Amino acid sequence: MTRFIFITGGVVSSLGKGLASAALGALLQARGFKVRLRKLDPYLNVDPGTMSPTQHGEVYVTDDGAETDLDLGHYERFTGVPSRQSDNVTTGRIYSTVIARERHGDYLGATVQVIPHVTDAIKEFLAADPGGADFLLCEIGGTVGDIEGLPFLEAIRQFGNELGSERAMYIHLTLLPYIPTAGELKTKPTQHSVKELLSVGIQPDALLCRADRPIPSEERRKIAQFCNVRPEAVIQALDVDSIYQVPIAYHAEGMDRMVLRYFGLDASQEPDLSRWTDIMERIRKPEGEVRIAVVGKYTALLDSYKSLSEALTHGGIANNVRVNLDWISSEIFEGDGTLEKLEDVHGILVPGGFGERGAEGKVAAARFAREKGVPYFGICFGMQMAVIEVARHLCGIAGAGSTEFGQVKDPVVGLMTEWMRGNERELRTGEDNLGGTMRLGAYECKLKSGSRVRGIYGTEVIHERHRHRYEVNINYRKRLEDVGLMVCGLSPDEQLPEIVELNDHPWFVGVQFHPELKSKPFDPHPLFSSFIEAAVAQSRLV
Ligand code: GLN
C-alpha cells in the first residue's frame, strides 16, 4: 500500500522544500521503507529544458532522458532512488495532455474544464507508476497563494480526500522570521499561510517551521492552537551548517516518528542514520583542503550548478578534504584578460554550457591547465572546449571550433544529426524544436583498456547521463591522438567520442556526459573522487 505525503510551502519561496522532502524521504528510508519522490511545478513550460539556468537553476536529467527540476537532484542525492520522467510534471505538460485528449475526441460531448479535467490529469500523474513505494512524497512547487498553483492544490485536496487520512498526509513548510526590535520569532505569517491553505480546503497535518533560532515552547503551542495541528506536529527546522545534516536534525526534532504515528505505524525502533553521521563526521573534520576554480557562464546563480557543487563536495568527502570553490565567469579570461585567478588553484573545472559567450575564456582556462600541469576536468561543453584548445595549439589546426557558434573552418565539434539509442536510430535535422530534442539521458559508453578512466571506474562499460546537441568530431580522432589527447571512451558504435584524456599530464579528463548527476554523498562519483585526489596531490606541490 502506497501512502502519500504532500509537501506545500508558504510565507516565502526558497525555504528549501525540495531539501525538506528529500531529507524526509531519506529518514523514512533509514527506517526501512521504500520511498519515491515527485515534484509538481506550476509553470507553463512543458519542462525546464528551455529555461535559462540563471532563471530556474540547473536542469536535472534523469536516466530515461527527462529534463527536470533541480529538486529531483536533491531527491536522488538523499535517497539514491533514480528519478524518472514520471516524477516531475508541470502545468504545461498537464495542459498539453488535456488539450491533446480534447482534440482526439476523448472528452466528446463535455465542456473541458479545470475541474474535473485538469485536476483529473494531475491526479493521474500523482498515482502513476508508484514503483512499489511505501511512501510517495509529492512536493508542490511555488508558494501557497500563487494563482498558478491552485489547480495542483485542488488536485491534492481531492486526492487526499479520496485516499482517506490513513493514506494521505499534508505537510506545510513555513518560516518564522525573527524580529530584532521585538526580540521574537513571529508566528503570524505561518498562521496566515495556513489560513490560505484552509481557504482551498486543505488542513495541514504537520507544520515544518524554518527558523534561525530555537522556537520557544510557548510559540509552538500557539502555532499548534491557531493552526489546528497537534503540538508534536509542529516541527522546528533550524538552519544547519551542511545540507547533509538535515536528516539528522529532523530526526532529532521527531519528524519521522511523528509521520509514522500519524499513519498508525510502529515508531518504536530507531532509524539507522549511520550513513548521515559518517558523512557529517567527514565534512566536519577534514584533513586538509583544496581550491578548485569552476570556470563557467552561469556563475550569477549558483543553483545553475547545483549537482556540480554537490559532486565536488562528495569528491572531498571521499578524500577527507574540504573543497573550496572559486566561481569564475570565463569572460574575464577573454581579450586581454589575465589568467592570474587560476594561479593558486589546485584544479580547474569547466562545466556544461551553451552558446558562444565566454567560450574563448574556457578555451584559455583549458590551455592554462594543460600547460601548467594543473588538474583539469571538462564536463560536456568543458570537454568540447578542451578539445578545441588541443586542436588549435597542439595539432596546429588554427581554425578549430564548434558549429554551435556558426560556420567554422575546422568543425572539431559539430552538430549531431543522428545517433543510436540502443538499437534505435535517433535523427535530427538541425531545424527541430529546441525543447526535448537533445541527446538526453543515460547512454552506454565503452572505456579503453589501459586508460586512466578505465582505472578510475574499474569497469569497461559505463552508463552516464547526457544533455547535448554537439559532439566531438570523430574524424579528428587520429590528429588529436597523435598529440596525446586520447579518445578513451566511445559510444558502442564507436561514432561518438565520450571521454578524452591527455597523456603526460597529472589529470586532464574531458567527458561528454554529466557525471555530477549521479554522485551521492554516500557514494561519491569516481571521477569526482579521482579529480579531487589529483587536486590534493597538486596542493602539495604549490
Ligand atoms: N552546448 C553543448 C552542446 O549542446 C554542450 C552542452 C552541455 O554542456 N550540456 O553540445
Image (spheres, helix red, strand yellow):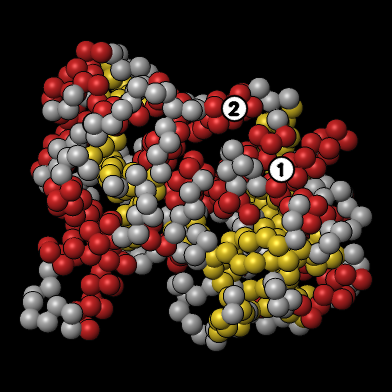
Quadrant for residue 335, please give it. Answer: bottom right
Q: Is mark 1 within 8 Å of ligand 1?
A: no
Distance of label 1 from label 2 (alpha carbons): 17 Å
Answer left or right for 216 relative to 131.
left
Q: Residue at x 73, y 66 (%)?
A: 446
- Quarter holding residue 223: top left
Q: Which residue is at a point 25% across and 69% down the rendered structure image?
A: 95
- Asked if 238 appears above or below 442 in the picture, the reply is above
- Tell me which label, 1 or 2, sits earlier in the chain: 2
Q: Give the number of marks.
A: 2
Quadrant occupied by the C terminus: top right
Write down the residue under mark 2.
278
Q: Neighbour class for label 1 at 10 Å: few (<14), some, many (≥20)?
A: many
Front position among marks 1 and 2: 2
Q: Position of residue 520 (x, y in %)?
A: 58, 43
Give percent across and percent down for residue 143. 27, 45
| 480 vs 448, nearest the viewer | 448
Type of the residue with mark 1: Ser
Check if mark 1's residue and mark 2's residue have beta carbons within 8 Å: no
Q: Tell me residue 427's x, y (percent).
A: 55, 84
Q: Provide residue 487's location: percent of width, then percent of height.
A: 80, 67
Element assignment for label 1: helix
Classify residue 393 as left or right of residue 312: right
Residue 529: numbered disc:
1
In this view of the protein, can residue 195 be seen by the observer? Answer: yes
Residue at mark 2: C-beta within 8 A of ligand 1 = no
> Circle 2 sits in a helix, a strand or a loop, which is it?
helix
